[in-house]
Amino acid sequence: MLHPDYDMKEVATIEQQFKELSAHSYLQQYAGYVEADRDLVYFLLECLRDAPFNKEEKREQILSALFAQAAFDTHEQVFQGDIVNQKEKKTRQLTVLAGDYFSSIYYRLLAKSVHQPILHLFSKTIQSINETKMELHCYEGESFRKLLDHIRDIEAGFIFALTTYYEKKELEQVAEIFFTLRRLLKERKQVAHKKLTSIAYALHWYAEGEKTFTAFHWPPANTKRLLDQAIQTYEELLQKQLQTVSPTLKNTSLYERLHAWVGLRKSEKI
């Protein structure tokens, strides 16, 4: 029987609270609407399942992680290339402001004394993720393994921090595979014109041997081949990991979601 905190009603409640807290019409006009990361919600619910907090306090920690991640995702949209007109300049400024706004919300959610250890943990995690992103901007294509490790640290940074804090080693192992895979799939999506994120920039530099902040007909052939190989490896790793998880984890909505996700990925290839 699934834990009662994991039903869709709880997920929907958290997503609705995120929507209400993030609503700001002026910023949305330029930065767009930001949705709660539903996959992260499921992982965090499982991570906090046995934590010594009431439901409201657990929601505060989950929402704080969602807003910290939203801040990173929003700042990532800031184009690093040259600005050609005032509209682009204003959009860049307001996108940065939107990311800062989400950061302020995560900080406010952890204002209670009961969350002080987590606030400290998040501060260290944010610093670590920022340092990793700076390393990607200086990446010289020396190691694809190192690049994959950087993607893992950026994409699963908050869930890593919390799974370590709450001693959820098995959950950490699943998360590092899943969130790395999810990001690789995102970067492989074909578009006619792409403004490169720090991750896409590093992937392009490693595969194509060229430094650029924009690309046409993304992904280029070498980058796509590299991504295809990495995605296949991580899909196989995730399938094996889900086959070997403990009965406790198998009896959760998170496992059901991941198992269905793997099944959907398989059916797409048939």
Image: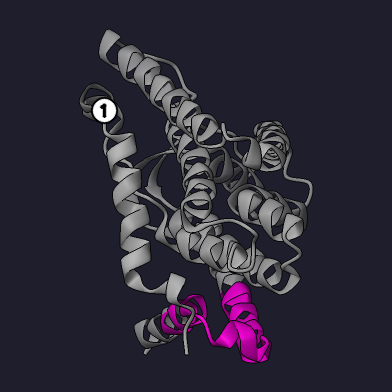
Q: Quadrant of residue 270?
A: bottom left
Question: What is the magenta range?
Answer: 232-260
Magenta stretch, overall SS: helix
From this viewpoint, is residue 192 visible? no
Find residue 91 and report its horizontal and vertical position in percent: 32, 20
- Residue under the image location 59 percent in, 34 percent down: 211
The amino acid sitting under disc 1 is His
29 horizontally vs 19: left or right: left
Query: Which residue is at 47% across, 38% downward?
Result: 196
Q: Position of residue 203 (x, y in %)?
A: 60, 49
Q: 144 and 158: which one is in front?
A: 158
Residue name at image x 65 percent, y 49 percent = 157
Residue 262 appears in the rendering: yes
Image coordinates of residue 97 in percent, x first then y, are 41, 19
Give the camera-side residue of 224 and 163: 163
Crowdedness near tag 1: few (<14), some (14–19) or many (≥20) residues, C-alpha within 10 Å: some
Mark 1: secondary structure:
loop
Residue drawn at x 44%, y 22% is 96
Front in this rendered view, residue 126 or 42: 42
**Residue that mark 1 sits on:** 24
Does the segment drawn in magenta span residue 14?
Answer: no
